[in-house]
Image: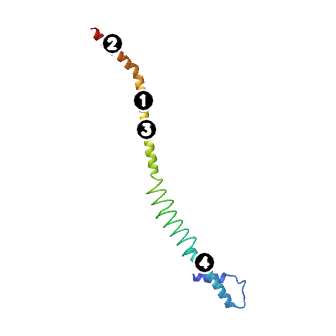
Amino acid sequence: MMLITVMMLILLPRQGYSRTNEFGNVRYRLLKNIRVLHYYFYYFYYYYYYYYYYYYYYYYCYYYCYYYYYYYYFFYYYYYYYYYFFLYYYYYYYYYYYYYYYFLLLLLLRLLLLLLLLLLLLLLLLLLLLLLLLPLLHLLLLLELQKQQQQQQQ
């Protein structure tokens, strides 16, 4: 951090303040550099607010909202809400609601439909067989009736 402060002291332009009071120049530039370092390093890195890496709100690693590890919304591990991979609620792998095993459910439904279609096909075959055997059954009944009539005549 000290190296960055020294680099910014060297690279800051000297416009807009007096060249006669050189100590005032250095002091002003040093205060300006400390302010810039305060904004960039503390806000964007460590503590509270918005963007990139570590702690609180938005993007990458730890606590609240968006991407990787810990608490709330998008990707990997822990708690509740919405999107992707491992533990709790909505979409893909293990526990609760929708998808994966949705595939297994669809597979079971397809198997049940296939069994239902096979049963319907078997019923149709039985009906066709019955229709084909009906004239033969009719002939057998006629023969049986003839035999009974012959027995009665004797």
Residue on which disc 4 sits: 39
- Residue 76 at what x, y percent from top left? 48, 63
Q: Is residue 101 in view? A: yes
Label 2: element kind: helix
Residue on which disc 2 sits: 146
Compare marks 3 and 1 and give the one earlier in the sequence: 3
Tag 2 near tag 3, CB within 8 Å: no
Front tag of 2 and 3: 2
Tag 2 near tag 4, CB within 8 Å: no
Q: Residue at x 28, y 10 (%)?
A: 152
Compare marks 3 and 4 and give the one earlier in the sequence: 4
Front tag of 2 and 4: 2
Residue on which disc 1 sits: 125
Relative to 134, is 81 above or below? below
Compare marks 1 and 4 and give the one earlier in the sequence: 4
Compare marks 2 and 1 and give the one earlier in the sequence: 1
- The amino acid type of the residue labelled 2 equals Gln
